[in-house]
Amino acid sequence: MPSIFISYRRSDSQADTGRIYDRLVARFGKEAVFKDVDNIPGGVDFQKFLNRTLTACKVVLAIIGPSWLRAADKKGTRRLDDPADWVRVEIEAALQRDDVVVVPLLVGHARMPRAEELPNCLKDLAHRNSRDARPDPDFNQDMVRLIDDLAEHLAPPPVVSQPLLEQYRQEVRLCIQEDEGEISVFNRSVLDSFRTTFELKSEEAAAIEAEELQIYKAKEKAITQYSKVLAGALSSEKPLREVTRRRLKRLQNALKLSDDEIDGLELPPIPPVIDGRGKVPIVSRKDLHECDISKLLFLKNIRDPDGDWSYTLNRIQKMGGSPESRAFEIYWRLTGKGANTPLAGDLMILNQHARVTHIVEMLDDEVRTTDVGYFRWVRIVWMPELDNWGKLPHQRDTLGFEPPRFGGGAAYSFTSPNFGKFHAAWDSLKAFQEHVFQQLTESTL
């Protein structure tokens, strides 16, 4: 279908319109330009064809000659005042569409009509920026200018490359994960900057955000569902029977959860069964200022199926820990993966709900195995003084980078070459350790 629609009145500008049409066809091709008699096939309903063409076009050239405004019929009635006048119908239809550019094109030294000279339905035409197509010797110069304008209007929208779309999708995914199913004001400004830089349309960006939000919520729902089933199984079977493990594996596959996501599920804090190992280690309370900050080597994500803050002093006491020394047995994971990596004296950051909630010191090298998972004895050397931990700074501010979101319960070593997010943000482990110390204590080493 044509993309340029020429609206003109034969009695007013037929010769000029013919020259203009020829120049436009030479530049854009005959299929791209519509000028009534030259384009309407024989036997076709004139009105329906015009309406269909107007709907498909991107630009309407309203050619206005010296007599365009005052042209009248045999009875002396001004043609523009007739609702059935085709010039009026064409321009009125174009003005009603937001996606069509209407360009008044003045020929034969015609002037631009004022709003009060036009019917109500055409008054908006007076506010459109006009162009001239003056007689020779200025005709060629004016046509070059007009064609340049039209080429800009008709240029296809830039196609965003697939890598840029995927990069935007990745940024959206990270923002949703950071904000736990939402997009904060800060992350909204970040995404808007990416969208502008990548020249993404608003509707394209919105579609990607909706898709990623749906994926996130589905993943969260699946993890919660599996976690509750697992907790129910463990409450009645210790250890789990082989038939139960097979059923859980089928459920995992049905929920499309990876082994890492399952391996990282946190169970609700469980009062530890010491099994003859002894009671809580007898240690005194220790503060972060008393620690060797070079021992800050690990990060562990905490997930609670009920969404509660884990390892508050009240919950530690209920688990059999010591509120005085702040020593307790931390639940590692359902499996022992990495449980024996931190050594006695090493420091580990705990993060939950995108907040840094604790720094704990490993009290020994032992890993305790139970039917519900693996445990390590630790002592809190830093925890928030705020009652509402939700008001804590976002973890990206405390850590200087954004840890992985899914796989709750996973532990990461800052010295591991596989911890890509950490190494992308920090060139120096010492600088990172000093940064965290300063953020949490508001003092320098």
Image (cartoon, rainbow, N blue to C red):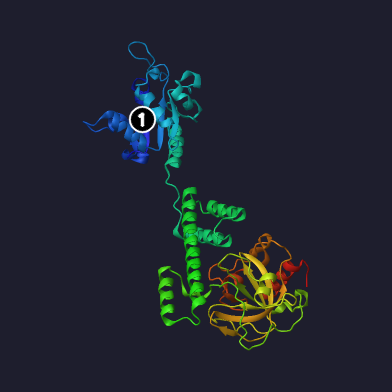
222 w.r.t. 151: above or below:
below
Q: Is residue 177 visible?
A: yes
64 w.r.t. 389: above or below:
above
Q: Residue furthest front?
A: 236
Q: Secondary structure at mark 1?
A: helix
Q: Quadrant of the C terminus?
A: bottom right
* Residue 114 horizontal/vertical position (percent): 50, 21
In front of the other: 339 or 401: 339
In front of the other: 161 or 431: 431
Q: Is residue 260 left or right of residue 313?
A: left
The residue under label 1 is: 19
Q: Is residue 317 left or right of residue 373?
A: right
Residue type (three-letter) at the residue carrying disc 1: Arg
Q: Residue furthest left?
A: 43
Question: Which residue corresponds to the image point at 53% horizontal and 74% vertical from the top-left?
Answer: 264
Q: Is residue 410 left or right of residue 317?
A: left
Question: Which residue corresponds to the image point at 36% horizontal and 36% vertical from the top-left?
Answer: 55
Q: Quadrant of the N terminus?
A: top left
* Residue 123 horizontal/vertical position (percent): 47, 24
Q: Is residue 115 left or right of residue 315?
A: left
Q: Residue furthest bottom?
A: 276
* Residue 322 horizontal/vertical position (percent): 71, 77
Label 1 CA crowd tier, 10 Å (few <14, some 14–19, many 20+) = few
* Residue 66 horizontal/vertical position (percent): 42, 19
248 w.r.t. 168: above or below:
below
Question: Which residue corresponds to the image point at 41% horizontal and 75% vertical from the top-left?
Answer: 247
Rendering quarter of residue 152? top left
Question: Which residue corresponds to the image point at 75% horizontal and 74% vertical from the top-left?
Answer: 288
In front of the other: 23 or 236: 236
In front of the other: 429 or 69: 429
| Label total for image | 1
